[in-house]
Image (spheres, rainbow, N blue to C red):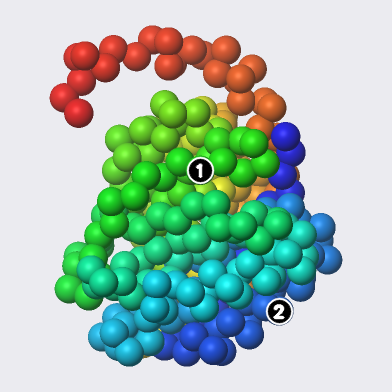
Amino acid sequence: MKWKVGCIQMDIAFGDPEGNFTRAERWFEKAAKEQCTVVVLPELWTTGYDLTRLNEIAHQEGRDVIAFLQEQAKKHQFHIVGGSVANKTKDGVKNTMYIIDSEGKLVHEYSKLHLFQLMDEHLYLQAGNDETNFTLDGEEAASFICYDIRFPEWLRKPVLNGAKALFVVAEWPIQRLDHWQTLLKARAIENQCYVIACNRAGEDKNNVFAGHSLIIDPWGTIISEGGIDEELLVGEVDLDEIEEIRSRIPIFDDRQPKKYFC
């Protein structure tokens, strides 16, 4: 299975969901012209890090976001890894990703497990407890949000359950760009899978964001990398290569999990 992936490395209007829906719609049009089969949005793409107003601007059970993504997926006939949004639930606001297939079906949702205290996420968001695995086009993949990539054991779990591609969405700041690039390459190499990572561009009143979305193959080779500005990053992944690559260095056969502490 081959996917032509488009990462929408968009700037995000701070605290303006309506404006960001319009902006995303324009980027979806561009992805359709590039004939992308999977399109990825960044983290918190409807609100940005307007955390203090989340109770006011978060999406009630994500309903309007899901409806919008379903409409766009059916219109353009591509799958959407819907970044993440502030999702208002009965348990509080969560940072939630929705995956929609090309027929408009909601196939998966994942709420961020690891909250980033340095940006006060723990004060305004509730951690999720969802599984990360999902199936798209009959292929196993997994979903992660930003800070999650610093926890390699969390990303290893879905790979052991069959994932061939790890989708990461983020609002990663420019001062830690080298961490972003290094961590993502490491996650691809150690799990012998594709990593498809969509970061935002632009800035808000407190942060400048790194851009540099990445599509990385199972050897850690960069297929495509964005710059710092808004763009649609496009790259092709071939999931049929995974089995052959894993046969060359059979790390999963050589694991000794009984000896590990975690």
**Residue at the spot 61% in from the left edge and 69% down from the top edge:** 69
Q: Position of residue 236 (x, y in %)?
A: 72, 44
Relative to 16, does residue 149 appear above or below in the rendering?
above
Image quarter (top left, top right, bottom left or bottom right) of the N terminus: top right
Tell me the crowding category of disc 2: few under 14, some 14 to 19, or many 20 or more residues within 10 angstroms, Cα based: few
**160 vs 131, nearest the viewer:** 131
What residue is shown at x 69% (from left), y 64% (from top)? Answer: 73
Residue beneath the point at 52% across and 78% down: 64
Instruction: Name the residue type under label 1.
Output: Phe
Image quadrant occupied by the C terminus = top left
Looking at the rendered structure, the kind of residue marked 2 is Arg
Q: Which residue is mark 2?
A: 26
User: Residue farthest to the top?
Assistant: 254
Q: Is residue 9 visible?
A: no
- In the figure, 40 relative to 207: above or below? above
Residue 255 visible in the shown view: yes
User: x, y (%) of residue 235?
Assistant: 70, 49
Could you tell which of marks 2 and 1 lies nearer the N-terminus?
A: 2
Q: Residues within 10 Å of mark 1 (few under 14, many from 20)?
A: some
Point out residue 15 in the picture as x, y percentages from the top left corner.
42, 88
Q: What residue do we see at 61% from left, 35% from top?
A: 139
185 or 145, nearer to the observer: 145
Instruction: Choose between 158 and 214: the one closer to the eye.
Output: 158
Q: Is label 2 in a helix, a strand or a loop?
A: helix
Q: Position of residue 225 (x, y in %)?
A: 61, 54
Query: Distance from label 2 to label 1 (Cα)?
Result: 27 Å
Q: Nearer the viewer, mark 2 or mark 1?
A: 1
Q: Which residue is mark 1?
A: 134
Q: Considering the numbered disc 1 on the image, is that residue within a helix, a strand or a loop? A: strand
Circle number at residue 222:
none
